[in-house]
Amino acid sequence: MITVNQSYTEVGFPEVYPLASLEFKDRLDAFGHLAQVHLAWGANILSCTPEEIKVQSRVLNKVDTTIYKGPVDEMVELCELVSMYQWASQFDEKVVKSAIEAHTAIAQKPSIAGSTQILSMLAGNLIGMSKLKIVAMLYGGVEEPADIDVGLSMELDELIAALQLVKEGHGSFRTVLAATAA
């Protein structure tokens, strides 16, 4: 079983407030929680050991610290995810370019234009989501820079669907994209 303990502080104040405690009996649920709730929003990895992962996220003046703990055999996939997420940081130029393009597109929507708070909150998500896309492509065997550029421009669910088709033997990443575009 993997336990997750969340707490938060407010910038400039030393008090730590408990936020939530969760237990995941299925390690894939914990994997999804880490990916979607923290890494997709641009969390920083504070530490990663075989039995514990500590991440930190910021939203406005709140700093959220979350600790995932479990037996080594249940934490393997989470540690691999964190390792690949950190590896994706080497693509910072591509990640930032992709995030800026998405940020610009969002900023032009009439319902959001001019709302600096919404745009600043989305920045972490856009960078985190770009890193997750790179991790998904790495895991799916996509290594060509041109293919990575294409994958970064896709929605995450579309990218995962394309990678699943590759995994099932329907061709290379480029072949699958060409077939689905037709």
Image: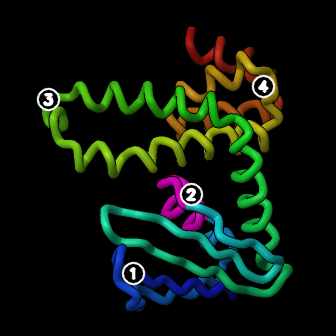
Residue 52: image x %, image y %?
Answer: 73, 81
Identity, as a three-letter code, of the amino acid under mark 3: Pro
Magenta segment boundaries in residue numbering: 32-43
Crowding at mark 1 (Cα within 10 Å: few <14, some 14-19, many 20+): some
Identity, as a three-letter code, of the amino acid under mark 4: His
Residue 163: image x %, image y %?
Answer: 70, 35
For residue 110, the mark is: 3
Residue 96 shows in this picture? yes
Which type of secondary structure does the marked residue at label 4 adopt?
loop
Which type of secondary structure does the marked residue at label 1 adopt?
strand
Q: Earlier in the sequence, mark 4 or mark 2?
A: 2
Up the image or down, 109 lies above or below 54; here it is: above
For residue 9, the mark is: 1
- What residue did someone put label 4 on? 170
Crowding at mark 2 (Cα within 10 Å: few <14, some 14-19, many 20+): many
Residue 146: image x %, image y %?
Answer: 71, 16
Image quadrant containing the C terminus: top right
Identity, as a three-letter code, of the amino acid under mark 2: Leu
- What residue did someone put label 2 on? 39
Label 3 – label 2 distance at C-alpha: 28 Å
Q: Check if mark 1's residue and mark 3's residue have beta carbons within 8 Å.
A: no
